[in-house]
Amino acid sequence: MDSCLVIPPPKGIKPKAIIKFVGGAFIGAVPEVTYSYLLENLAREGYLIICVPYNVTFDHAQVTRQVFDRFHACFDSILASGLPDSGLSVADIVDLPLYSVGHSNGALIQALVGSYFCEKIPKANVIISYNNRPASEAVPYFEQLGLLVGQMVPVISPAYSMAQSASGDALRVLLDTAGTIIPDYDPETVVSLTKFADQLPSVFGELAQGISEFKPTPSENLECFKNAYNVKRTLLVKFDNDAIDETDRLEETLKPRVEFFGGKVEKIALTGNHITP
């Protein structure tokens, strides 16, 4: 629906809450593939899930507003007409509580949404494997990569543009060929791979322009959380074998703010690593 992926509970089960889900960078574009186990289990438990994709960029403020707008455009559409194909009326949905769940970069985005906006905020946030390291630490040799991409873009851009402008007939021939070569070829898999690949040119473009750090910076984001985070209940989830997790630092930042207005921040540690979800 619109640009979001809506996953209702199995037919015959009325939803007990709505989950806005935002996944990690790149992989969040295809949650039906990368988070299928988690999302399917949540749906079976009776949650109506709205997965919000976003374009990967160094500008986290822009992404945060994009996610907020996309989710509410989708949600407003659902509130206007229900989900008739799933047997859900507007009355089944309108009074449901809203929870936000984010993983990795999606966890950062959910925390930023809870800080940038004071209206339409969720009843609770579930922030999984929070990470907001500087770009130079998040991607080793980032500046060198930027220089390399700057040299490559003039070469790869024409080829990408040709692929993007290919006619429907040409694409159909390509997919038919893939089906001949790969007997178990699944068209949905190709669509998922396309969603993933479509994010690359914009990132390459930013690298080619010499952009090598996120904005706001990680320290600026923490300061924002310290002064503006608005979600009353937050569950922080970390895994015991995750070298890039920064949940503890986020907890130190959020707790004083949330407790000041009568809210609560809880943290749990589970067995696993950064990609466990």
Image: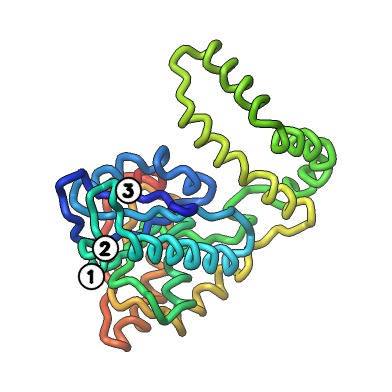
Q: Nearer the viewer, residue 171 or 271?
A: 171
Q: Horizontal placement of 45 versus 1: left or right?
A: left
CA gap between label 2 and label 1 equals: 9 Å
Q: Nearer the viewer, residue 33 or 2?
A: 2
Give whichever of discs 2 and 3 has the lower sequence position. Answer: 3
* Whole-percent x, y for residue 104 in the image: 44, 55
Say if 218 sits above or below 27 in the image.
below
**Dot 3: few (<14), some (14–19), or many (≥20) neighbours within 10 Å?**
some
CA gap between label 2 and label 3 equals: 16 Å
CA gap between label 3 and label 1 equals: 18 Å
Q: Horizontal placement of 153 versus 272: left or right?
A: right
Residue 244 visible here: no
Q: Are marks 2 and 1 in contact (CB under 8 Å)?
A: no
**Dot 2: few (<14), some (14–19), or many (≥20) neighbours within 10 Å?**
some
Give whichever of discs 2 and 1 has the lower sequence position. Answer: 2
* Whole-percent x, y for residue 124 in the image: 29, 70
Say if 165 sits above or below 92 in the image.
above
Comparing marks 2 and 3, which lies closer to the viewer? 2
* Whole-percent x, y for residue 182 in the image: 51, 14
Residue type highlighted by circle 3: Ile
> What element does badge 2 sit on?
helix
Residue type highlighted by circle 1: Asp
Q: Look at 73% across and 59% down and name the residue there.
A: 211
Q: Horizontal placement of 164 versus 93: left or right?
A: right
- Dot 1 corresponds to which residue? 95
Q: Nearer the viewer, residue 80 or 63?
A: 80
- Dot 3 corresponds to which residue? 7
Q: How many marks?
A: 3
Q: Horizontal placement of 15 versus 7: left or right?
A: left
- Dot 2 corresponds to which residue? 90
* Whole-percent x, y for residue 6 in the image: 36, 50
Q: Look at 54% across and 46% down and name the residue there.
A: 26
